[in-house]
Image (tube, helix red, strand yellow):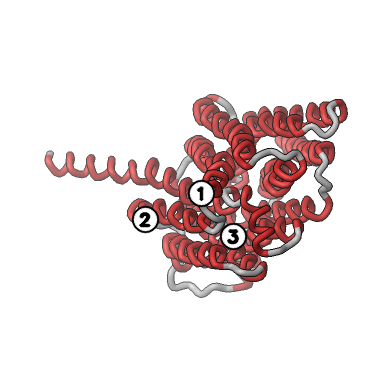
C-alpha cells in the first residue's frame, strides 16, 4: 500500500514536470530567444548612430538573426537524435550567451552582425529539441492546447519586448539590453535542466549518414500535406514579421511615435494574440483541428481586406496597420497552433527531422520576407496592407486545396 502510494506520488510529480513545468519553461526559454529580436527594436536608431551605419544595415541586423536561425536548422534534428535533445538545447544556450556578450561589446557592424548571428543560432536548438519532445509525448488535442497556451507565453517577447527595451533605454545605454537578455535566457534554462525529459527516439551510437539525412528531409518536403501546413504557418507570420522589421522605422522615424508608445502598440498587437491563444486552449477539444484552422484563416483574410480598403481611404495612417494587425493576431492564434501540430502529424519521419524541416521552411520564409521588406518596403502604410492581403490569400488557397483533397 505504501509502495503504491509512493508510486502514485512519483507518477504525479513526473506528469507535473512533463505536462506543466516543461512546456512553461520551454516557452519562457523560447521567449528569451525572441526577446533578443524584440527588446532591441527601440534601440535600433541608437545602435545605428553608435555604429555609424545606414538604416538598411540596421535592418540587416534582424535579417542576420534569421540567417543564424535557419542556417544550421537541418543539422540540429539528426544531431539531437544522436546526442540527445538535452545536450543540444544547453549547448545552444551557451552559444546564445556568447552572442549577447559580443553584441554588447561590439564596436563595429561586423562584430554586431556576428553576435546577432550567434543569437539566432540558439533558436533552432531550442525549438527543435523542445517541440520534438512535445509532439512525441502529447496527443493531438493535448498538443494543440499546449501549443496554444505556449503561444500565449512566447508572444510575451514581441508584446512587451520593445516596451521593456524602451524602459531600459530611459536609464541605461543600449548595451544593457543584451546583458538583460542573458539573464532572461539562463533562468528558464536552469529549470529545464531539472524538468526536461529526454526523447524516446534517440539513436546514440549510430553514425550520422548524410544520405539518410537527405532522404529523410526529402520525404518531408515531398509530403504535400506536411508542406502545405508548413507554408500556411509561414504565410500567416508574414504580417507580424514584416511589422517587426519595418515597424520601428515606420512608427518611430516616419510617424515620430515615442519608443514607449511604440512598445504599447506592440502590446496591443501581440497581446491580442495571447488573449486569443487562451481562447483556443479553452475550445480546442470541442472542434476539429482543421475546422479551427479554417476559422482562424477567415479572420486573417477579412482583416487584410479591411486593411487594404481603409489604407486607401485614410492615406498613410498608421492606425490602420495597427488595427489590422490586432485582428490578424486573433486569427493567427487559431491558425498557428493547429497548422504546427497538423504538419508534424502528417509526417512519417522522426519528430526531430519533421520539426527541423517545419521550422526550416518557416525560417527561410521569414528570412526572405525580412530581406524583402528591408530592400523594397518604402515606409508606406498601403504597401504594408497589400503585403498582408497577399500572404493571407496564399494561405487561403492552400487551405482550400487541403479541404478539396479531404473530400
Q: Residues within 10 Å of mark 2 (few under 14, many from 20)?
A: few
Dot 3 falls on a residue whose secondary structure is helix
Q: Which label belongs to residue 190?
A: 2
Q: Which label belongs to residue 326?
A: none
Of mark 3 and mark 2, the one earlier in the sequence is 3
Residue 65 in the figure: left or right of residue 156: right
Expressed as whole percent of the image width and height from the top left, the position of residue 141 reads 51, 35
Instruction: Looking at the picture, tell me which residue is in the foreground, 29 or 16.
Output: 29
Expressed as whole percent of the image width and height from the top left, the position of residue 346 reads 61, 46
Work out how far the residue at label 3 is from the one at label 1, CA to CA, in angstroms. 27 Å
Tell which residue pokes out farthest to the left in this image.
2
Quadrant location of residue 59? Answer: bottom right
Residue under label 3, please give it.
120
Work out how far the residue at label 3 is from the one at label 2, CA to CA, in angstroms. 20 Å
Residue under label 1, please give it.
171
Whether residue 228 is visible to the viewer of this picture, yes or no, is no
Quadrant location of residue 85? Answer: bottom left
Q: Nearer the viewer, mark 3 or mark 1?
A: 1
Instruction: Looking at the picture, tell me which residue is in the foreground, 358 or 369.
Output: 369
Residue sitting at x 57%, y 49%: 39
Dot 1 falls on a residue whose secondary structure is helix
Quadrant that contains the N terminus:
top left
Expressed as whole percent of the image width and height from the top left, the position of residue 404 reads 76, 34
Asked if the residue under mark 1 is in contact with the one under mark 2, i.e. CB atoms within 8 Å, the reply is: no
Dot 2 falls on a residue whose secondary structure is helix
Amino acid at each position: 500500500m505504501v509502495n503504491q502510494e509512493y508510486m502514485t506520488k512519483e507518477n504525479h510529480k513526473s506528469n507535473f514536470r512533463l505536462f506543466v513545468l516543461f512546456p512553461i519553461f520551454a516557452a519562457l526559454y523560447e521567449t528569451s530567444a525572441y526577446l533578443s529580436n524584440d527588446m532591441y527594436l527601440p534601440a535600433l536608431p541608437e545602435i545605428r548612430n553608435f555604429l555609424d551605419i545606414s538604416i538598411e544595415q540596421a535592418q540587416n541586423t534582424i535579417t542576420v538573426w534569421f540567417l543564424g536561425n535557419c542556417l544550421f536548422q537541418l543539422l540540429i534534428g539528426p544531431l539531437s537524435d544522436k546526442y540527445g535533445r538535452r545536450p543540444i538545447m544547453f549547448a545552444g544556450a551557451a552559444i546564445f550567451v556568447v552572442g549577447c556578450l559580443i553584441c554588447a561589446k561590439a564596436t563595429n557592424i561586423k562584430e554586431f552582425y556576428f553576435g546577432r548571428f550567434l543569437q539566432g543560432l540558439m533558436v533552432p536548438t531550442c525549438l527543435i529539441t523542445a517541440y520534438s519532445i512535445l509532439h512525441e509525448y502529447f496527443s493531438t488535442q493535448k498538443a494543440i492546447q499546449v501549443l496554444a497556451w505556449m503561444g500565449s507565453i512566447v508572444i510575451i517577447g514581441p508584446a512587451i519586448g520593445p516596451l521593456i527595451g524602451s524602459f531600459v533605454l530611459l536609464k541605461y545605454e543600449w548595451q544593457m539590453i543584451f546583458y538583460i537578455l542573458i539573464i532572461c535566457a539562463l533562468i528558464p534554462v536552469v529549470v529545464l535542466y531539472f524538468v526536461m525529459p529526454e526523447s524516446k527516439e534517440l539513436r546514440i551510437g549510430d553514425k550520422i549518414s548524410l544520405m539518410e539525412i537527405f532522404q529523410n528531409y526529402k520525404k518531408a518536403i515531398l509530403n504535400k500535406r506536411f508542406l502545405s501546413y508548413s507554408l500556411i504557418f509561414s504565410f500567416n507570420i508574414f504580417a507580424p514579421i514584416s511589422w517587426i522589421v519595418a515597424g520601428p522605422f515606420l512608427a518611430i522615424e516616419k510617424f515620430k511615435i515615442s519608443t514607449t508608445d511604440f512598445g504599447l502598440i506592440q502590446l496591443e498587437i501581440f497581446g491580442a494574440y495571447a488573449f486569443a491563444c487562451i481562447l483556443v486552449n479553452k475550445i480546442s477539444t470541442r472542434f476539429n483541428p482543421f475546422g479551427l484552422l479554417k476559422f482562424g484563416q477567415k479572420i486573417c483574410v477579412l482583416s487584410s481586406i479591411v486593411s487594404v480598403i481603409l489604407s486607401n481611404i485614410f492615406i498613410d495612417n498608421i492606425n490602420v496597420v495597427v488595427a489590422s494587425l490586432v485582428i490578424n493576431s486573433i486569427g493567427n492564434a487559431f491558425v498557428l497552433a493547429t497548422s504546427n501540430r497538423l504538419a508534424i502529424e502528417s509526417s512519417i519521419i522522426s519528430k526531430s527531422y519533421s520539426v527541423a524541416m517545419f521550422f526550416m521552411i518557416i525560417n527561410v520564409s521569414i528570412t526572405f520576407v525580412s530581406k524583402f521588406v528591408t530592400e523594397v518596403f518604402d515606409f508606406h502604410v498601403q504597401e504594408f496592407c497589400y503585403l498582408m492581403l497577399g500572404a493571407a490569400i496564399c494561405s487561403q488557397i492552400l487551405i482550400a486545396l487541403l479541404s478539396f483533397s479531404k473530400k
